[in-house]
Image (tube, helix red, strand yellow):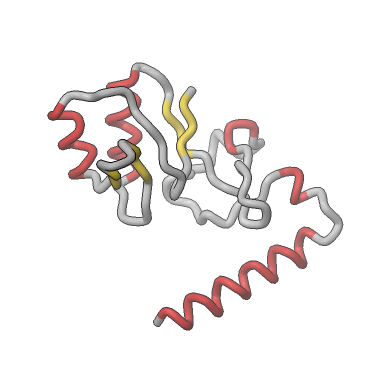
Amino acid sequence: MIKLSKGIPFRLPRVGSDVFAKLMRAKLKYDRKKGMFEITDNTNLQLVLSILNEVLNDEVILELQCILCSKSAGCSECEYADICDRSNVSSLCICKECLNKPDAYEQYKEVLQQRLKFDKKIK
């Protein structure tokens, strides 16, 4: 199983020019200098995951990051993994470690408020 996360660069084995072109059309970001790919907000996740599953002959999944600690949210071990469509859900997940903290809800609200303030400044 290969786990990819939005915003975290990753390497792929050399793929043919036809596969590379498909990935670029799916708006997977590529840094030529570093030879790294990256999933962004503009990436067509369904298409990229489909292409990579086929080409790599391995299961490729999207792993979300914890909104509080930025570590892996643990999607593959999550009790909702079978019904969660990570390509369409919010990236506001919490890992089990952070969720078990007594002040998890307060921290979550604080992070959301900070993000909303930041979004308002951008607009």
Answer left or right for 16 relative to 70: left
Q: What residue appears at the point 76 percent right and 44 percent down from the top-left corner? A: 97
Residue 55: x, y in percent? 28, 22
Q: What residue appears at the point 46 percent right and 33 percent down from the top-left corner? A: 61
Q: Which of 101 and 71 is in front in this view?
A: 71
Answer left or right for 97 relative to 58: right
Residue 68: x, y in percent? 67, 56
Vertical placement of 15 versus 75: above or below?
above
Quarter where residue 123 is shown: bottom left
Vertical placement of 2 versus 89: above or below?
above
Q: Which residue lies furthest to the right in this view?
A: 102
Vertical placement of 8 versus 53: above or below?
below
Q: Nearer the viewer, residue 45 or 40?
A: 40
Residue 29: x, y in percent? 29, 47
Residue 27: x, y in percent? 25, 48
Q: Which of 84 and 45 is in front in this view?
A: 45
Q: What residue appears at the point 23 percent right and 38 percent down from the top-left corner? A: 23
Q: What residue appears at the point 52 percent right and 39 percent down from the top-left corner? A: 63
Vertical placement of 32 versus 110: above or below?
above
Q: Which residue lies furthest to the top in this view?
A: 57
Answer left or right for 35 relative to 25: right
Quarter where residue 117 is shown: bottom right
Answer left or right for 121 relative to 78: left
